[in-house]
Image: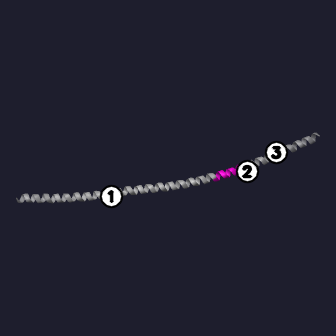
Amino acid sequence: KQLKDHLESQFSMKEAYTTMIREDKDKMEKIKKMGDELQGRVHSDFQALHHFLRVEEEAMLEELKREQEEMLQRLERHLEALQVAIRDVEQNINILRQTASSTEQSVLVE
């Protein structure tokens, strides 16, 4: 009887251990599955983030390029206006010199 009780006790323990092993293996599979899903989600989220950042970068670079072009065009127009002003001043200088020269010659002739 004691041997039978001891044997039944051992079978019960074996069954309990077997059940724990099965439960632990099930938990391990769930953890692996969750880990795989999380890795996939993280990868997907980072791909989306990278795409968003690339689009933002392109938009910012395009905006900077546009602003640079506008500034350069404004400065180019300003330079052209200054060159016209210099030509006008040079013409005035020449006219004044000619006038001064003519006036001096007139004074000398008198």
Disc 3, disc 2: CB below 8 Å? no
Residue 72 vertical position relative to residue 27 in the rendered view, above or below = below
Queried whether the magenta region covers residue 37, the answer comes back as yes
For mark 1, what is the residue?
A: 77
Packing grade of label 1 (10 A; few <14, some 14-19, many >=20) is: few
Q: Position of residue 56 (x, y in %)?
A: 50, 54
For mark 3, what is the residue?
A: 17
- Choose the circle earlier in sequence order: 3 or 1: 3
Q: Position of residue 70 (x, y in %)?
A: 38, 56
| For residue 21, side relative to residue 88 (left or right) | right
SS label for mark 1: helix
For mark 2, what is the residue?
A: 29
Q: Quadrant of the N terminus?
A: top right
Q: Give the magenta-colored segment's residue range.
A: 30-40
Alpha-carbon span between mark 3 and mark 1: 88 Å
Tell me which corner region of the image, top left, top right, bottom left or bottom right, holds residue 108.
bottom left
The amino acid marked with disc number 2 is: Glu
Q: Give me the residue at 17% from left, 59% from top.
A: 95
